[in-house]
Amino acid sequence: MKYTDQGKKDTRSGFGAGMTELGRTNPKVVALCADLIGSLKIETFISENPERFYQVGIAEANMMGIAAGLTIGGKIPFASTFANFATGRVYDQIRQSIAYSDKNVKICASHAGLTLGEDGATHQILEDIGLMKMLPGMTVINPCDFNQTKAATMAIAEHHGPVYLRFGRPKVPNFTPENQTFEIGKALTLQEGSDVTIIATGHLVWQSLLAAENLENQGISVEVINIHTIKPLDDAAILNSVKKTGCVVTAEEHNYLGGLGESVARVLASHHPTPQEFIATQDTFGESGTPEQLMEKYGLNNKAIEEAVLKVLKRK
Amino acid sequence: MPNYEALEELVVQVRRDILRMVHKVNSGHPGGSLGCTEFFVSLYNEIMELKDGFDMDGVGEDVFFLSNGHISPVFYSVLARRGYFPVDELNTFRLIDSRLQGHPTTHEGLPGVRVASGSLGQGMSVAIGAALAKKLNKDNHLVFSLHGDGELQEGQNWEAIMYAAGNKVDNLIATVDRNGQQIDGGTEDVLPLGDVAEKFRVFGWDVLEIENGNDLKQVVEGLQEAKNRTGRGKPVCIVMTTEMGNGVDFMMHTHAWHGKAPSDEQLETALAQNPETLGDY
């Protein structure tokens, strides 16, 4: 495999590192948090820019409204909390005060998906990509590792418009280049192949590379695409790949309803109908457990991806 | 000294605008709009420091947020007559392809509107954000907001009320339209609000009351007093008692005209009570 794990790191720390850089380079950037500073890893931003940080307490609805208001006056607010409280809890505030009002707010959501682990289903949102991608004008980004999350954090400050940036809690392999440029909406082909395309987002990208390595050993040529931006989706990259391979597996830490897989299926159904298998949770809530146990139980690891590839190859 | 005669002429004309807008499309919210006419006319023509033209950031001027967006007719009329957009455009209220949506929005680019509202309880948070931006920008201008009293039943308001006091957002003047009415009846019957002024006080706000929010002099003086109280470490709240449907006898003392348009005959009666002053659109 051409990618190597440079050492496990959490994507939320990538967000924190990106905020530190933004604090030093972009005076318009302000940060808000709802009583989760330590979890969001923004201590450095706060200590270096205390006047540009707003602690709102356990009041996420108010946080989204204040963030919308801060844009009026030219600020670029990064409103941060856990993914569940950053989306489902405040959907109407995001819908009216941010999305419909065209406000330049960055909603930064940590602890997304099952890998939050032991806290259980109350905190493990698996619906957030769907909620956010349905909002007109909302950009939805789910980077795969520390380096990419840092790059994405810095890139969204340069993009005018509401953004949902989703990342997670556990330490996972950090394998993309340090100081990469991040282009919103541009899929990254991590490895080329001719038999099957795996399209993955977030933590599932590394799992897809592991699966691809094993499959290559079995003589199957696998193309792996990292879709860090779920909306706007890179339709051309998806179509170019599946025209070559003729089948696809999508992989995400999210419900199969409303997630990346459905977005890919829509593109394929409209332009190039193709057999597809979905690695995603099957319309269920999560539960307590270690991240590894949960990803195993809910079929979101490299083994599940390999099985899905073997299945979809038979459908070609 | 404000020219109360001129303000009163504008109030009467705005009432006519509200009634005609709502009548034409047989939809909209005349009751609360008429109740807040004196407030809007005073705010935009006597109180706020405004630049010429409109830009979203509003740096170097006072800004206003309407939280109870359903009273869009009075907002639109006052904005148009203050020169934000052509008065003739009031003719398009709630019609397809109009910038004057049922509830105010930035989405169609209507000058004067800085956030969408309609889903209740969100405006105070946005106003606080704009006030914080003004502080960061070292812009000494003020942020005004208006909230329905029934709207205070939404919990987000109390998050915002707590935040503004706790963080000394003292460049904010939030006015509560205390008309005592909401869709299903009196506020004290639907879900009692009790002593609104006292609630803001115990949360740490500087509160003043306008006993008759349909008396121009009381409104102007109340708003001026509120301005005097800014910059002293506390957000300022005005609890303003108004009469829904004010200026049209059959629309007053009832909640029936919250979201109902007058018939042709009722319009004629209502307009006769408010003779044209500055010219209909």
Image (cartoon, rainbow, N blue to C red):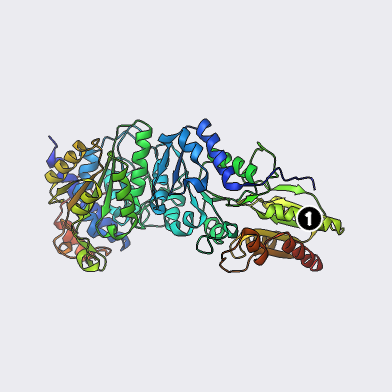
Residue placed most toward the observer, B117 or B232: B232
Q: Is residue A191 above or below residue B30?
A: above
> Quadrant of the rendered structure where residue A204 is?
bottom right
* Residue A244 shows in this picture: no
Label 1 lies in what chain? A
From the top left corner, tell me how far across and down residue B116 is, in percent.
Answer: 38, 51
Q: Residues within 10 Å of mark 1 (few under 14, many from 20)?
A: many
Residue placed most toward the observer, A292 or A49: A292
Q: Residue furthest right?
A: A219
The residue at the point 55 percent across, 34 percent down is A21
What is the three-letter code of the residue carrying label 1? Ala
**Residue at the spot of label 1:** A212
From the top left corner, tell me how far across and down residue A223 is, in percent.
Answer: 78, 53
* Element assignment for label 1: helix
Residue placed most toward the observer, B271 or B119: B119
From the top left corner, tell me how far across and down residue A22 is, in percent.
Answer: 53, 35
Taking the image as shown, residue A119 lies to the left or right of residue A51, namely right
Taking the image as shown, residue B235 lies to the left or right of residue B96, namely left
Taking the image as shown, residue B94 lies to the left or right of residue A299, namely left
Residue placed most toward the observer, B116 or A123: A123
Q: Is residue A42 above or below residue A269?
A: above
> Number of callouts in the render?
1
> Quadrant of the rendered structure where residue A6 is?
top right
> Quadrant of the rendered structure where residue B190 is?
bottom left
The residue at the point 43 percent across, 57 percent down is A92
Quadrant position of the N terminus of chain B in the picture: top left
The residue at the point 18 percent across, 39 percent down is B224
